[in-house]
């Protein structure tokens, strides 16, 4: 698969615009792709993204998903209600991405606000 560099994105957009699609569906797909590349030109500069240290591709995300979710939810004998599993996965994701303290602080604030509202109603 060829890599696109800054100047080559414009060439790809130009080439796509010159295509003669066989069907209206194909024309719509080509227009959508050309519009996407035009609107996201800066994000398609992979060389600068790689030099800046950003990961390219979804491999790291897919790998983390295979590790983080099943390890907790697919334990032997474990079963979950759907709502509880979503909350648990959110906390586990926060633990792995380093935002657990902020998530838990927000949870505490929400619980405190709810308890204060109950006290006001009494």
Image: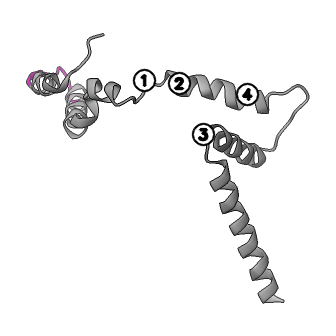
- Residue 121: name its quadrant: bottom right
Residue position marked by numbered label 3 in the rendering: 97
- Name the spot of residue 103 as percent of width and height, x first: 65, 54
Q: Nearer the viewer, mark 3 or mark 1?
A: 3
Tell me the crowding category of disc 1: few under 14, some 14 to 19, or many 20 or more residues within 10 angstroms, Cα based. few
Counting residues from the N terminus, which is met first, the one under dot 3 or under dot 1? 1
Q: Nearer the viewer, mark 3 or mark 2?
A: 3
Between 77 and 41, the residue placed more toward the observer is 41
Q: CA distance from mark 3 to mark 1?
A: 18 Å
Secondary structure of the residue carrying numbered label 3: helix
Residue position marked by numbered label 4 in the rendering: 70
Counting residues from the N terminus, which is met first, the one under dot 4 or under dot 2? 2
Q: Residue at x 65, y 37 (%)?
A: 96
- The kind of secondary structure the magenta stretch mainly shows is loop
Q: Which residues are magenta?
A: 18-24
Tell me whether the residue at label 4 lies in contact with that at label 2, contact meaning CB atoms closer than 8 angstroms: no
Q: Residue at x 81, y 85 (%)?
A: 119
Residue position marked by numbered label 2 in the rendering: 60
Along the horizontal axis of the image, is 38 left or right of 75?
left
Counting residues from the N terminus, which is met first, the one under dot 3 or under dot 4? 4
Q: Residue at x 21, y 28 (%)?
A: 30
Q: Nearer the viewer, mark 3 or mark 4?
A: 3
- Name the spot of residue 120 as percent of width and height, x first: 77, 88
Tell me whether the residue at label 1 lies in contact with that at label 2, contact meaning CB atoms closer than 8 angstroms: yes
Is the C terminus in the top left, top right, bottom left or bottom right quadrant?
A: bottom right
Residue 3's place in the image compared with 77, above or below, is above
Q: CA distance from mark 3 to mark 2?
A: 13 Å
Q: CA distance from mark 4 to mark 2?
A: 16 Å
User: Per the image, is 20 magenta?
Assistant: yes
Secondary structure of the residue carrying numbered label 2: helix
């Amino acid at each position: 698969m060829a890599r696109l560099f800054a100047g080559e994105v414009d060439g790809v957009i130009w080439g796509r615009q010159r295509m003669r699609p066989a069907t209206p569906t194909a024309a719509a797909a080509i227009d959508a792709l050309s519009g996407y590349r035009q609107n996201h030109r800066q994000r398609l500069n992979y060389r600068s993204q790689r030099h800046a240290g950003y990961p390219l591709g979804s491999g790291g995300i897919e790998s983390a998903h295979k590790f983080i979710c099943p390890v907790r939810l697919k334990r032997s004998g474990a079963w979950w209600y759907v709502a509880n599993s979503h909350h648990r996965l959110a906390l586990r994701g926060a633990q792995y991405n380093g935002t657990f303290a902020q998530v838990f602080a927000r949870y505490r604030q929400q619980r405190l606000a709810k308890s204060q509202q109950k006290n006001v109603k009494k």
